[in-house]
Amino acid sequence: MHFAWYRLPVLVLLFLSSAGADDDIGIAEEPVIEMSVEADSGGEVAQEDTLAAPETLPVLKTFVKAEYPADLVKEGVSGTVSLELLVNETGRVDSVSVIRGVCSRLDRNAAAAARHFVFTPATAAGEPVVVLLQYDYRFTLDDVVDSITPYVNFSGRCLEKGTRKPLSDAVVSLNIIDSTADTSLPVPFGTWMRTIGSFPGQTLDEGRLVAVSDSMGRFQFFAVPACSVKVAVILPGYVTFETEEEIVSEEELTTTYFVESQAYSEYEIVVYGKVTEKEVCRRQLSIGEVRKIPGLGGDAVKVIQTLPGVARPTMGSGEIVVRGSPSWDSRYFVDGMEIPVLYHFGGIKSTYNSEALSTIDFYPGGFGTRYGGAVAGVIEISGRKGTSERLKGSAELSSLDGSIFVEGPIRDSVTFMVSARRSFIGEIIKPIFRM
């Protein structure tokens, strides 16, 4: 009887797995070798060849990372895609099929990346052979989690109420009110919290971020998601302090918490008083704004006469009337020092040189007690600093008045400014009244 002999390429079935570009490829120690036999045309079974075991196993040389869509990462979709790879005699992948998948998009991406893998060829009896590999590609959130770095976006101090003594070893806990508020997190909220809970200086305890204040009462939290949080400060011997804060993306929140003690010293004196009220009405004009107002004749201080609620009592008077009150019920200040009059005789020119002016504050009411016995209004003039560039000045002389202004540097950090003004109106009208 005639026997026909047929010899097929050796197929070696190996099992490989990968979790990413940085992971090692695992190869089974005893790969399964698949043999194929055929019958001849007479229906008799051909005798099986005796094949040698593979001498070398394939090793992955070129790994191609599969795309991991950001939206799937954010949703926490992960898992292992099992692939079957047919690697030819040159180490190239001829075909890829999915044995067990995770989802259609990850399956496609893993298969597309595997097609570009390059292996060292497997050999049997000294010749390259075709092998069939089972390859596991794992999609995990580890790479994204490893990219989360600590950065301080919430810090503060814990002080004792009344004494302002720093409170050390105070437990500060943050309870997230709305876990869906921050839509910019690259991973699921739970994964983010577990990651930042492992940062040095803070821990995650039953969903709450916890930090402990140092010897100066300072505490800080890292990478807190943008949302509303309930803050609790707990320290034995003190009343638990609770409040709510709003964490804003790309901003650092700094706070100071005053925690009340359950018992104070018997020799301690507590004084109760009212907080100084703030000015309820103030109008401030800078020199740049004043120069834009027409009709002032180069005198910036005369802008007071144009403000609402201000009037002149009589023609030729240098006084002003605020909200109908007598002129003596208003006060004038230059850099905190009271001056008797704001304008020279006739109200044509002010007593303060406009070149030295920085701002003018007008308080038509509601001002504090630091302004003395003023009842109607307060006008406060603030001078500017002298220039540090070079020595310069100006002089002006007219039939009504004369003025001089000089400023400049003395040294790098010291400047000076000198200003003087003299009115001639009295000398002009004096002969008229003698007639």
Image: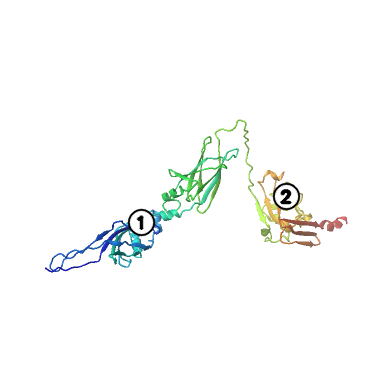
Task: Identify whether 136 is placed above or below 340.
Answer: below
> What percent of the width, then of the height, locates residue 204?
45, 45
Examine the rendering and report whether any part of residue 301 can be seen.
no
Examine the rendering and report whether any part of residue 119 can be seen.
yes
> What percent of the width, then of the height, locates residue 400?
80, 60
Which residue appears at 78% of the width and 54% of the height? Answer: 344
Task: Identify whether 427 is placed above or below 243.
Answer: below
Residue 26: image quadrant is bottom left
Looking at the image, residue 432 sits to the left or right of residue 295; the answer is: right
Residue 394: image quadrant is bottom right
- Whichever of labels 1 and 2 marks the residue nearer the N terminus, that label is 1
Identify residue for label 1.
138
Identify residue for label 2.
333
Tell how many labels.
Answer: 2
Q: What secondary structure is marked by label 2?
A: strand
Tag 1: residue type?
Answer: Arg
| Residue in front for this viewpoint, 154 or 91 | 91
| Residue in front for this viewpoint, 193 or 381 | 193
Tag 2: residue type?
Answer: Phe
> What percent of the width, then of the height, locates residue 142?
41, 54
Q: What secondary structure is marked by label 1?
A: strand
Task: Identify whether 94 is placed above or below 417.
Answer: below
* Quarter of the N terminus within the rendering: bottom left
